[in-house]
Image (cartoon, rainbow, N blue to C red):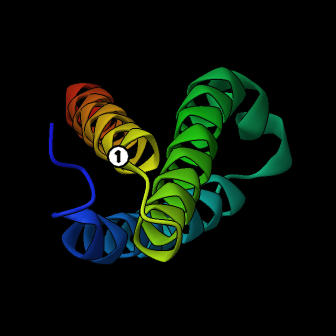
Amino acid sequence: MFGVDVSTEVVSAATAMAGLVLVYMGALAAGYGSFQPQERRTVRQAYQRRGWVAFGCVIAAITSAFFGLLAKWIPSEGCGDAAVVILFICFASGIWIAYETAKEIK
């Protein structure tokens, strides 16, 4: 692979993905907070699952950006390739979050 060659783009995409997921987490927290305390017990598991997956996605995106920056700084093919792979994992978790959210709309 040519991770160093695309590391600038990976850093941009990863930070954008982290920001997008942070906005989603804010909406998720606001949605959960809109329920009455007695209603929260029934929706807690679904909100927690999506929240933890979103948290993992943010961590993955920041890690991808870190490896992308490191690949440019050192220049290291391994760090660049790792940044690309982690970004793909982050994209997959973003798709899963969107699917789970859409599935629960009734």
In the foreground, 35 or 72: 72
Q: Tell me which amino acid carries mark 1.
A: Glu
| Residue 21 visible to the viewer | yes
Image quadrant where residue 1 sits:
top left
> The residue tagged with tag 1: helix, strand or loop?
helix
Task: Classify residue 85 as left or right of residue 55.
Answer: left
Quadrant of the snapshot with the C terminus: top left
Q: Residue at coordinates 36% horizontally, 64% vertically from top-left?
A: 14
Task: Classify residue 30 as left or right of residue 7.
Answer: right
Q: Residue at coordinates 84% horizontally, 47% vertically from top-left?
A: 37
Which residue is label 1 attached to? 77
Task: Classify residue 22 as left or right of residue 97.
Answer: right
Which residue is farthest right? 37
Q: Residue at coordinates 64% horizontally, 61% vertically from top-left?
A: 29
In the foreground, 55 or 76: 76
In the foreground, 29 or 69: 69
Residue 81, percent from left and from top: 32, 40
Work out whether 47 lies above or below 36. above
In the foreground, 44 or 73: 73
